Amino acid sequence: MHMADALLSPTVGGALWAGTLGAIIYSAKKLKEKMDEKMIPLMGVLGAFIFVGQMINFTIPGTGSSGHIGGGMLLAILLGPYAAFLVVASVLTIQALFFADGGLLALGANIWNLGIYPCFIGYPLIYRALVKKDKSAKRIIIASVLSVVVGLQLGAFSVILETKLSGITELPFNTFLLIMQPIHLAIGLVEGFVTAGIVNYVRNLRPDIIEDLEGVNGLSSGRSLKKLVIVMAILTVITGGAFSWFASTHPDGLEWTIEKIYGKPEIPEKKNPITENLSKFQGKTAVLPDYSFPAKEEAGKQPSWPAVDAGTSFSGLVGGIMVLVLVVIFGLGIKIIRRYKEKT
Amino acid sequence: MTFDTEYFNIGYLDSLSYKDTFVHRIDPRVKLIVTFIFILVVVSFPKYELSSLMPFFVYPVFLLTAGDVPIRAIAKKVLFISPFAIFIGIFNPLLDTKVMVTVLGIPITGGWISFFSIIVKFILTVSTALLLIAVTSFPGICEALERLKLPRIFVIQLLFLYRYLFVLLKETLRMVRARDARSFGKRGKEIKTFIRLISVLLLRTLEKAERIYQAMLSRGFRGEIRVSKRHRLKYHDIIFAIFSISIFFLFRNFDVVDYIGEILNRSFR
């Protein structure tokens, strides 16, 4: 369920990046406060472990298809929420770069969907609460299945929201919901059982290691979580607002939802001299022309970017092919220059 | 994809990044920022925009050719298009059947246009992300992140992960091969076996972490790691940044494709 750049609008992608960055900075600060320096190599190597662990396939019972683990909750159990979140973020960063899983803009959304929910909701609110006193194998199974399922459901729901808010898919919200949530329920159940299996197995084999880890990540109580949630929410809203400053003359992204709610692309607002002047200023300074609010007096005019119509589309086709040819020639040119330089 | 090929792929991209060309020498900070702006500009196009995206191929093609990256290395991965993007996009032609344009007598619906727009955006963004790592070594990216003031512990995390990734990959490769040699078809790959396999790997990893920590202590580790800084912002870095960013905005603000098409159209008549 990796998000892809192509499915995101700059508004949604940017807002989620801001929230994710906020969470990374906050987690790093929290860790620094009273971290055992042992954690530094431990986090790095466990990150590599999750990375390779995801590459080992196993057969999913009943379906015959094969799957792999995600590992977010396992990391949270082993390292505590803050360290686990940083590890999840770094695993996803390397995957985005080397496997192109989604892309760089979508990385913010992916860290959010796969990191925030298991580390800051599933683990502290569900897993820890259930396993606090009773650490029997059965308890661990219940706790990990429940927390993984909740985390993945929230993640899948965020994917739906992000895609819909970006306004690129035609898929109706309800259909999308009906496809995504059950699939991720199944994935969550498998992942939950596997996570519990690993924790229990390791606990049986080397109980000392698990206890040792619990000592190292002792700081990971969820006390300051409220602050984190507030920081993330503020950052997300601010960036979302700043980016939708650039929102399009075409109803996309946030406007799409607003249009659904109000039946009009813009929230009906009273004439306000300040906003009017601001949008005038905005019109002059916009870097992405379609991403500016149309100034009020311009509203009647044609949008600045040519809308698709039969007249322009043919020249668009011809021009598009021509441009691609030019790009290829450009590339070949550079190659020839390179060869020439290497020879001399 | 099998484990072997994935393992090979990571190592291959890594080996590409140690070449020495003009783009390899650009400050990683500049490359990271320019690439990010490129992606933002590309995804800022509305969903029915297709032809105006074409000029943007210039940037990945530039990185590819100037960086001396074999096209096959990138194309293979990009063509293996994310099933998720396809899965989401394919509903557009089914649901949005309003005919928007007729090219040479063939009616084209809005759904197909927006579907191909997603695919083109996907190819552009994914290929640049891959090319970025192919022309910037991973330590270079980490250096850039450090200097862009991301928390140091996160950057150290990335460096550690990357360093030990190859060690663990080798170990896991052997384990997976051993499992495959002992299993027949789907037998032997059940969850139960998997849990034991990965638990053993986890224990080995934890023991490795302990040894690494001891080794670091004996080399004078005091909880502080410095990230090596080899790059300095030079003249050509700034020129590259200004030049490419202004080109992106030119392509975004002026419909170059339409202009060229219009000229061609007129000259044929």
Image (spheres, helix red, strand yellow):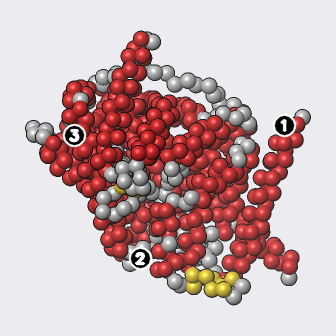
Indicate the chain on which mark 1 is placed.
A
In the picture of the structure, the residue carrying the numbered disc 2 is A264
- Asked if the residues shown at circle 3 and circle 2 are in contact, with their CB atoms under 8 angstroms apart, the answer is no
Nearer to us: label 1 or label 3: 3
Residue B111 or residue B195, whichever sits in front: B195
Check the picture and name the quadrant holding the C terminus of chain A.
Answer: top right
Res A216 visible? yes
Q: Is residue B72 above or below residue A342?
A: below
Q: Inspect this view and state whether residue B237 appears.
A: no
For the point 21% across and 43% down, the residue is A124
Q: Is residue A253 left or right of residue A328?
A: left
3D distance between C-alphas at marks 1 and 3: 59 Å
Q: Residue at x 49, y 42 (%)?
A: A94
Amino acid at pointer 2: Lys
Q: Secondary structure at mark 2?
A: loop
Badge 3: chain ID: A
Q: Which residue is mark 1?
A: A342
Residue under label 3, please give it.
A200
Q: Tell me how many marks there are.
A: 3
Callouts 3 and 2 on one subunit: yes
Estimate the x, y position of residue A8 in percent, counting from the top left: 48, 60
Residue mark closest to the camera, 1 vs 2: 1
Q: Secondary structure at mark 3?
A: helix
